[in-house]
Amino acid sequence: MKLSLRNFNAYTVVAFIILLVGIIFYIMWGLRYNVWADVGIYSITIVLVLTGILGMILSLSREKTEEQQ
């Protein structure tokens, strides 16, 4: 499996947006409520950030097929 920017598509954009939403959500919650260590916030942030990272990896990955070898 190889990552390639040639495979950049709409799924990559959606995954990047989900990643940004997770990070922004954590920062905004911390600034608003001044709570940086909360299990509930961690659980929501981790789901969003991991979904974004894995989505980007999967959308940019390319598998070798018999025709490409």
Image (cartoon, rainbow, N blue to C red):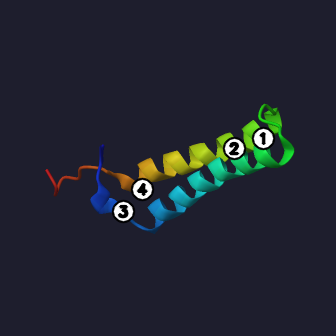
Q: Nearer the viewer, mark 4 or mark 2?
A: 2
Q: Nearer the viewer, mark 1 or mark 3?
A: 1
Q: Which mark is residue 49?
A: none
Q: Kindly identify which residue carries mark 2.
A: 45
Does the CB distance between marks 1 and 2 fall below 8 Å?
A: yes
State how many labels appear: 4
Q: Secondary structure at mark 1?
A: helix
Amino acid tagged 4: Ser
Q: Secondary structure at mark 3?
A: loop
Q: Kindly identify which residue carries mark 4.
A: 59
Amino acid tagged 3: Phe
Q: Which mark is residue 8?
A: 3
Q: Nearer the viewer, mark 3 or mark 2?
A: 2
User: Picture coordinates of residue 8 (x, y %)?
Assistant: 36, 62
Residue at mark 1 to residue at mark 4: CA–CA distance:
27 Å
Q: Kindly identify which residue carries mark 1.
A: 41
Does the CB distance between marks 3 and 2 fall below 8 Å?
A: no
Question: What residue do we see at 32% from left, 61% from top?
Answer: 7
Question: Closer to the N terminus: mark 3 or mark 2?
Answer: 3
Does the CB distance between marks 3 and 4 fall below 8 Å?
A: yes
Q: Is residue 67 left or right of residue 30?
A: left
Q: Is residue 9 left or right of residue 15?
A: left
